[in-house]
Image (cartoon, helix red, strand yellow):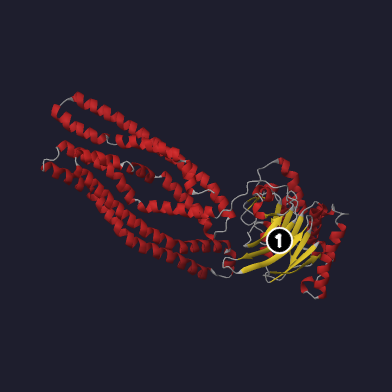
Amino acid sequence: MMTVTSVFQKARGSYARIWLHSIFIALLALSPFLYMMQVTERVYTSHSWETLGFITVLIGFLMLVWGMLDHYRTNALHAVGYRIDHELRQGIFDAVHRGDRPEAFRAYADIATLRQGLTGSLVESLMDASLAPLFIVVLFILHPVFGLVAIGYILLLALLSARGRSIWKTVRAEQRVPEDQAFAFGMATAARRETIRAMDILPGVRREWAGLEDRASDIVLKGHERAGILDSAIGVLQQAQLVILVGTGATLYLLEQVSATAGMAAFIVMMRGVGPVVAVARNWSVLNEVRMAAERLDAVLSEEPEEPQSPLPDMQGHVACDNLGYAGADGKPVLTGIRFSVPAGSIVGVVGPSGAGKSTLMRLLSGGARPTAGSVKIDGFPLALWPAAQHGPATGYLPQAVDLLPGTIWQNVTRFAPFDPALTPAVTEALRMAGALDIVQGRGRGLDFRLLDGGAPLSGGQRQRIGLARAFYRMPRVVVLDEPNSALDAEGEKNLAYSLTELKRAGSTIFFSTHKANLLGICDYILVIMDGYMHSFSTRDDMLGRLNAAGNPLLAADKEAGAGADQGGDQDAGRVGEQA
């Protein structure tokens, strides 16, 4: 399973090489101070132009090398950071779409936070700070007091920084809940702006959204009040750094413990050794944000199910449910104890009152949702064992709320397959079966006509037909349709009935839920769900007779249209194309 740590481990070699360059960068960064010392000791005493020129050229060359190495380090850090970002993005994208964490949509922002942390000056400061022990050793050589002062200074910075990180971690954890709620609420209301505008719900939803944002802001403000004191203390220490260093050197000089040159050298070394540590301490909030982003990304990645590696035999379409159950996020059962088995090439109609659990069953049969009890098996294998590369192309699914994606009609029907002229016949056939050829022919750009999120500007019926074409594309072995005729007129329902019998003849196993009786005549089996339980399951003729005898209002409509499609489909399949 991918984790942020595992991705970082792949980049260890690159970071090690960059760190080695940091050693030379840190040493070469002493060049200006070395220049100052040499000019003071040699040029001022000798009044030699030659000495000044030689020292200037030498230090200038060293600074040029420093600049080149620093440029390399910056570019290398960006390259490694974006490589990690690229690998994580693919894993996160898959995890967001395969997992069930409601807050997973924020993972993209966490990736951006991680990338900025990996490619910014913070990493350079961390690498430079890791060299502090080397400079401390030099300080101990000059005089033990210099080394002890540096250690004490660093420990005090570390203590303040750790306390600040602890406070901010608690604040961010508390803030995340209302912040996520506000973001999700804002996205949900934006998607329903027409309803909000029509009934003037804006003041109420604005008040609700603002309340969530205010809760998050209040938590942050209180956190800043607590952590701001520590941040100010670190700032005071940073400003006092020069006083501490110069004062220590002067004290030892007056006590005749060190020479003036040694005092100046200690000052330079301590500035280079302690400076990056101060920079890290001042940026502890950024470091904390990066660490928390990595933890949240790991949490999202951990939710992604393990992808089966071993391919299974080609799917035939024998579907069975074994004590299938599903519970919502609140733990309340939505479906319980669903048991049935149908052979490949069957058509199963699922009926029941609103809220009975039909849509949930469709989601489970398609693999869009994972059961919390029991299993769905295809050809004897649980859905979880089917590799996505096998299961996806062999499955057609139409949700109750048709969810067309931003892209062209071609992309939506082909499920975003790369453009290939060889796929055109399959696309045309899917559109024909869905009765959607007129939609393409009526658009100026044909299959290249671009849809917006949800399928705009198509009408509800047109969106449903494009969704059906996507489900029918390349004759999947298992087709699951949630109320496929809800937005179709009588002609569209008749076309749908013929298309389903055409899929059946091709060997597809078809499940559809409906509130209408018109399509039930083409079924081989009918499943009745009541209050989340399987009320009954039997063959079409037996079930229709039992339901009619019970006076079920669902079946009050004439079922002859569906039965006629079942009987006449073999004789006149070509009429489907004419009706489209």
Observer able to see residue 486: no
Left or right: residue 484 compared with residue 178:
right
Q: Residue at x 23, y 26 (%)?
A: 53
The amino acid type found where label 1 is placed reads: Cys
Observer able to see residue 141: yes
Left or right: residue 509 compared with residue 81:
right
Q: Position of residue 238 (x, y in %)?
A: 26, 50
Q: Residue at x 65, y 43 (%)?
A: 418
Left or right: residue 331 compared with residue 129:
right
Q: Position of residue 297 (x, y in %)?
A: 49, 53
Q: Secondary structure at mark 1?
A: strand
Query: Does residue 483 sit above or below 420 in this rendering?
Result: below
From the viewer's side, name the closer residue of 192 and 476.
Answer: 476
Residue designated by label 1: 321
Q: Which quadrant of the rendered structure holds the C terminus?
A: bottom right
From the viewer's side, name the closer residue of 40 and 432.
Answer: 40
Q: Position of residue 10 (x, y in %)?
A: 48, 41
